[in-house]
Image: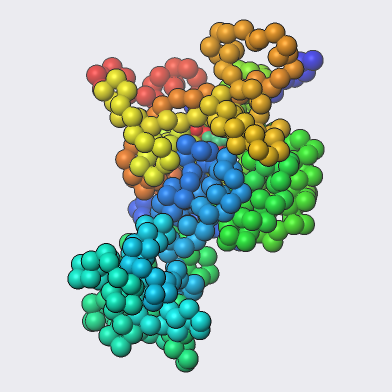
Amino acid sequence: MAHPEMPTALTFDDVLLVPQRSSVASRADVDTAGRLTPNISLAVPIVSANMDTVTEWRMAIAMAQAGGIGFIHRFLSIEEQADQVRKVKRAESHVIEHPYTIGPDAPVQRMVAELSARGVNGLPVVDDAGGVLLGLITRRDLVASGLEGTVREAMTPRERLVVGTTQTTLEQARDLMATRRVEKLPLVDDAGRLAGLITMKDIAHLDLYPLATKDARGRLRVGAAIGVRGDYLDRARAMAEAGADVLCLDIAHGHAEHAIDATRELRRTVDIEIIAGNVATAAGARDLIEAGAHGIKVGVGPGSVCTTRLVAGVGVPQLTAVMACAEACHEAGIPLCADGGIRMPADMSKAIAAGADSIMVGNLLAGTSDSPGTLLKRDGRTVKVHRGMASGGAMRKRTEMDAGGAADADAGPTRPERRWLLGRETEPGEFGKVVAEGVEAVVPYRGETHAVLNELAGGLRSAMSYSNARTVGEFHERAQFVRITAAGQVESRPHDVEV
Ligand code: XMP
């Protein structure tokens, strides 16, 4: 029943930030770093959504290099998802502690297949018994040797290699590789065994990606999504083993009791931080924090491909949802991630001003070169597919995947359809089945991920300088909103011109 004093809820377009006297002279003086969890901070507080049209390993690498982070979706087998996590963790590091290797007697053709499968350009050659370094083989060696013969015949042997030791610092490695003009520096221990590998690419990336989100060993950070039923604890363990830095619960109604219980169970099971959600109220945030969440994800229905509000009539406009949850999160010292509905830089600025520490983005990143899927041509425009994880197509894929295993009720409908939106009728006997709460769509191609992130972060920096804030914490304290009318919204957009 409607409450007589029903509160009003607002979203991004309903408000603007009020400009304030500011001592911030340059936008470069603003630090946009936001916390994702108590232990993970993002120089660019943007997270790519755990959706199958947004985040697989390529996107996760691009996000972490740019200073954000990506969450690998869970519409994959446990092994496939773990593989994706491993790919990100191996993409960069100060020292590759366990490089892929090959034995000397392997045929060159197998080595070539290994290079492609592993996504690397060369392999240290080690003796099969003791791991002693015998040489290094790269694609370049094959120019002379061709594709016949064994690795031993084609490799650059140990005596002609430039090598370092376990004591070699990054600076020494950089100098050594530059002066000797090599791209890979194997490290050996006192017994001559391979003890690691430093690559020029990793060193160059230190300069190329100064804001990168990295763990203590210099590896890019990555998150992984987890359900709340079925084999979710096995999946969580596998992600932790693969090196995931953080997990996020992937459930539409995070204030369901089974989501709260799952948060508690995950805390008991794995030793990595957990972001729980999605919620849209302070009570939801508090219950998940009490269950042990290290971060809260906020957003019920604001996403670009969500139809929860149309199908179920449920949701809270995102600005109000963030403000309500921010109070609970800040009291407990737990970061808040605003998930969904970010269409332009201003939305990010308003979400952070309202109390979010980071934002999760689907749509804007689905159109970049790093998202899964290929480019399509539609009416002369270049586009990519973006779909809700509770949409018909995503659910069909899930159902196929689950055919051999336990169905996961939280994934949504078992017989996914968009009948309601398409105006079709439910088939007889289907009463009681869950209906889709997302759509499939295309989004314009937007180029590279870092360009999208730069635009969003640029808007945030500008908004912070208008609010006299040098840090996200100051922005939370000082930002002031005004509510605007429909006339104000019209005035805010380009008008009376042909764009
Ligand atoms: P944007 O607006 O960035 O939002 O595309 C991404 C977020 O949308 C949520 N999501 C869904 N919500 N039905 C929903 O109600 C769906 O099918 C669906 N798929 C994704 C999710 O929170 C994501 O991060």
Question: In this view, which residue lies farthest toward the bottom?
Answer: 190
Q: How many marks?
A: 0
Q: Position of residue 199 (x, y in %)?
A: 35, 71
Quadrant that contains the C terminus = top left
Q: Quadrant of residue 433?
A: top right
473 vs 186: above or below: above
Quadrant that contains the N terminus = top right
Residue at image x 34%, y 73%?
151
Tell me, what colour scheme is on the image? Answer: rainbow
Q: Is residue 290 at least partly visible in the picture?
A: yes
Q: Is residue 96 left or right of residue 397?
A: left
Question: In this view, which residue lies farthest toward the front?
Answer: 149
Q: Is residue 299 at least partly visible in the picture?
A: no
Q: Position of residue 473 (x, y in %)?
A: 56, 52
Question: In this view, which residue lies farthest toward the left?
Answer: 144
Q: Quadrant of residue 121?
A: bottom left
Q: Is residue 336 left or right of residue 367?
A: right
Q: Position of residue 292 (x, y in %)?
A: 75, 52
Residue at image x 66%, y 25%?
413
Q: Quick check: which quadrant has ligand 1?
A: top right
